[in-house]
Image: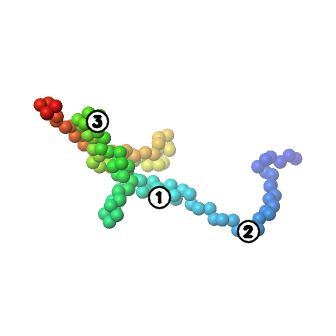
Amino acid sequence: MQLSFTEKKNIRKSFGKLKESLSIPNLIEVQKNSYKELTEFKHDVEQHLVKGFDRVFKSIFPIEDLNDKATLEYVSYKLEKPKFDVDECIARGLTYSAALKCTLRLVVYEIDQLCI
């Protein structure tokens, strides 16, 4: 009788000198920690470090127009809770997501026409 590919037993011979293999690190933990650091608001007063989304937004803003008539400034952000939990999203065929809402300030400068 012919054995299928999954039913065959592979006999493996090790020529290595080490009897124990290295332990595999928890790779998903690295991604979880990175996500946690990005989404949590942390402001370290002693080191003057701003982390997470706050740091990303502060690196981009303020945005100025070409004529220096207006500036768009970043004020704050809020990461809302997801509408559905993981199981509900799987059942409905949706993506597990949350809304990221930013508060921005638009500053429009008044230019005196007499000075120009």
Of marks 3 and 2, which one's residue comes earlier in the chain?
2
Task: Tell which residue pokes out farthest to the left in this image.
Answer: 114
Kind of element beneath mark 2: loop
For mark 3, what is the residue? 65
For mark 2, what is the residue? 18
Asked whether, in this view, residue 82 is left or right of residue 73, the answer is right
Kind of element beneath mark 3: loop
Alpha-carbon span between mark 3 and mark 2: 64 Å
Residue 86 visible, this angle: yes
Residue positioned 31% across, 63% down in the render: 45
Q: Residues within 10 Å of mark 1 (few under 14, many from 20)?
A: few
Of marks 1 and 2, which one's residue comes earlier in the chain?
2
Q: Position of residue 36 (x, y in %)?
A: 43, 56
Q: Which mark is residue 33?
A: 1
Alpha-carbon span between mark 1 and mark 2: 32 Å
Type of amino acid at the residue the image marks with label 1: Asn
In what quadrant of the picture does the C terminus appear? Answer: top left
Check if mark 3's residue and mark 2's residue have beta carbons within 8 Å: no
Of marks 1 and 3, which one's residue comes earlier in the chain?
1
Type of amino acid at the residue the image marks with label 2: Leu
Q: Residues within 10 Å of mark 2 (few under 14, many from 20)?
A: few
Q: Indicate which label's residue lies in the foreground, 3 or 2.
A: 3
Q: Position of residue 92 (x, y in %)?
A: 47, 40
Task: Tell which residue pokes out farthest to the front in this image.
Answer: 116
Nearer the observer, 24 or 15: 15
Q: Indicate which label's residue lies in the foreground, 1 or 3.
A: 3
Q: Position of residue 22 (x, y in %)?
A: 66, 65
Residue positioned 25% across, 43% down in the render: 105
Q: Indicate which label's residue lies in the foreground, 1 or 2.
A: 2
